Amino acid sequence: MAKHHSFASDLAALWFQAPMVIAARTQAMAVAAITGSATDYVEASRMVTEKMAAVAESVVAANVALVKEGMSAAAALAAGKPGSAAAHNRIAAAAVRPYAKRVRANARRLAK
């Protein structure tokens, strides 16, 4: 079962682990350029495909969260209540989560 992280821990993963992943992948690409290693070329290809998948997943998650929050806001307005300021955080968290998930996985995999 997937472990759910908070918005703060997702942002921390992007802040601290993303530079480590970038450094490891940059090193792998430099080695591939020198040695011509097929394994390192696979890593470069994986980097691109993972980013495309993360973007697609992020857009879908943000849109789903936006629709959910929009329905809640409409119901609140109909009931005469003000909207929730936390709705923005939930939408942002939904958009960031796919990136953070991949950064965590890549940091674990590349640290080996």
Image (cartoon, helix red, strand yellow):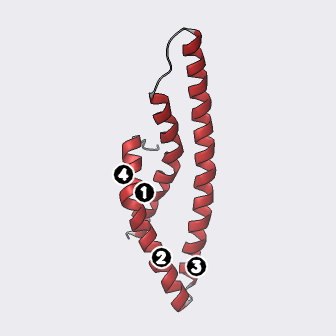
Closest to the camera, between mark 2 and mark 1, is: 2
- Three-letter code, disc 3: Tyr
Residue in view at x 42 percent, y 72 percent: 23
Q: Residue furthest bottom?
A: 35
Residue 28's x, y, as percent? Answer: 48, 79
Closest to the camera, between mark 3 and mark 2, is: 2
| Residue 12 - label | 4
Of the 4 image quadrants, the one containing the C terminus is bottom left
- Three-letter code, disc 2: Thr
Closest to the camera, between mark 4 and mark 1, is: 4
Judge left or right: residue 52 versus residue 5.
right
Mark 4 vs 1, N-terminal side: 4
Residue at the disc numbered 1: 104
Q: Give the CA distance from mark 2 to mark 4.
A: 21 Å
Mark 2 vs 1, N-terminal side: 2
Residue neighbourhood size for the residue with mark 3, other residues' Cα within 10 Å, grouped as few (<14), some (14–19), many (≥20): some
Q: Give the CA distance from mark 4 to mark 1.
A: 10 Å
Secondary structure state at the residue bearing disc 4? helix
Quadrant in the rendering for residue 45: bottom right
Residue at the disc numbered 3: 41
